[in-house]
Image (spheres, coloured by chain):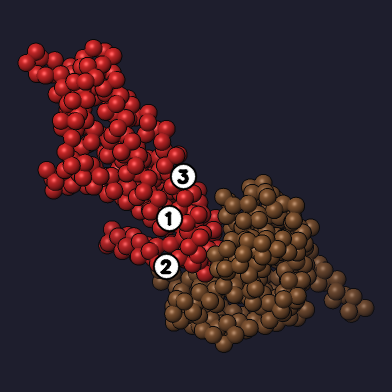
Amino acid sequence: MIEVIGLRKSFEGTEVLKGIDARFEPGKINMIIGASGSGKTVTIKCMVGLIEPDHGDVRYSGRTVYGLHIKERKKIRQEIGMLFQSAALFDSMTVYENVAFPLRMFTHQPEKQIKERVEFCLERVELSRASQKFPSEISGGMQKRVGIARAIAMDIKYLYCDEPNSGLDPVTSIVIDRLIKEITVEYNITTVVNTHDMNSIFEVGDNVVYLHKGAKLWEGHPNEIMDSEVPELRDFIFASPFIRNAYQHKLSFKKD
Amino acid sequence: MLPFTDFGKYLLLLRNSIRRPESTRMYAKELFKEMNKIGIGSLGIVILISVFLGMVTTLQTAYQLIVAWIPASVIGEIVTETAMLELAPTITGLVLAGRVGSSLASELGTMRVKEQIDALDVMGVNSAAFLVFPKILASLVVIPMLILISTALMTLSGAFIGNNSGIVPYHDFVAGAIDIFKVKVFILSMTKAYTFAFMISSISCYQGYYSSGGATGVGKSSTRAVVWSCVLILFSDYIIAQLFL
């Protein structure tokens, strides 16, 4: 479980996070949604330790991250996997080497054991055939899948995904969403997804946190999101004519 | 205040980069990769400039010294000493600042803007140590070697052109070169080589590591890396010469 307690962050006098509180349960896909500039990425970066918050705390299964000795913090970080918006694969390494990287860096496993684990992870994301290719030789969707394989190479307990569908076509987006869902349930991982992809929210989300101008305005299940009374959230959700029409259709269907 | 902030960040990066590695095997692999990239990658340009500088220095020295009462071996002395003291360390240093400095800064800058450095940090890897330390160490091993090669090539090409153009016979040139060789001059040359190697690599890594602003930002970092490396090479060249001579 991940607990976020009173997270505040300012950049050059501008308050970007205004005291975010949230709890993210294991085995569930927890989504942080909000318009661009709402503080989603800063929240995630504070949670993984890339940005130090001004106030507040982040606890991983009760263990606080900030104020810990660098060695202790490293241990927690090794339990965290992250899928970046750009996949962030190392250009100079092949797909195989990218996935093997954390194993070679943090474990003393023999190369044979590393090979088995890498092959298993690549098989899991259906990319065994691309193992000897370089990131520049594979598609954006495949890069995201390699990113997932690299994230699960170590026995992670927490998975962060920063806009996993950005730049992907709808079909590939669904593939990535389902893969994240399967992995979350299979390994009982606490997954936090930062997105504004409405399809992902309804397709795989278990819990949604809505951020607006650095503050948490709403939290709940995706099924409840349509009936929310928060005007900012309604504006955000119904910005898409497709969803607005679908909702009106649903309402008229209920009346009938 | 900005220069002090930058200097502070530079020192912090250096401090973080000398922390204990997570995996010695991976760091060693990275070190050899960098040594190959910096050393073998720069060998061609170093050979080219050294050979031409050696030949030009010999011709120009001879042009100024062709007087009956000056022995021909003096040309060998001047070319060798100039190569050791100034041309090989400084000119090679400046060329490497362009060749190696821009490459290190743009590599790290691209990794920064493509979130690859963030990925390392999230994994728990000390990105400064993993990325910066092998580059600085590789430069400290390889750049002085390149400067030694450059010194040798300048002297040899000078002797070759001197002999072939009939200005100074081989044996006179070599006699002059041997005569002028002093340990003090060699130490001074190597002091410059190590100082320049450290400056080129650490400044370029600093500029690349803290890149921001996408492709334009990487370009700016790369330019700053080369400009600052060149300025500091010239400045420290003077300081070292003043201290030693």
Q: In the rendered structure, find residue A121 and report the number of the disc placed on it.
A: none
Q: Residues within 10 Å of mark 1 (few under 14, many from 20)?
A: many
Residue B80 is situated, as x and y percent measured from the top left of the image, at: 21, 30
Residue A189 is situated, as x and y percent measured from the top left of the image, at: 68, 77
Q: In the rendered structure, find residue B134 and report the number of the disc placed on it.
A: 1
Residues beneath discs 1 and 2 located on the same chain: yes
Report the chain holding disc 1: B
The kind of secondary structure element at disc 3 is helix
- Dividing the picture into quarters, in which one does residue A48 lie? bottom right
Name which of mark 3 and mark 1 comes first in the sequence: 3
Q: Which residue is mark 2?
A: B20
Chain in brown in the render? A
Name which of mark 1 and mark 2 comes first in the sequence: 2
Residue B239 is situated, as x and y percent measured from the top left of the image, at: 17, 47
Q: Which quadrant is the C terminus of chain B positioned in?
A: top left
- Residue in the image at 43% along x and 44% along y: B38
Q: Which residue is mark 3?
A: B36
Tag 3: amino acid: Asn
Image marks 3 and 1: residues in contact by CB distance under 8 Å: no
Q: Residues within 10 Å of mark 2 (few under 14, many from 20)?
A: few
Residue A51 is situated, as x and y percent measured from the top left of the image, at: 48, 71
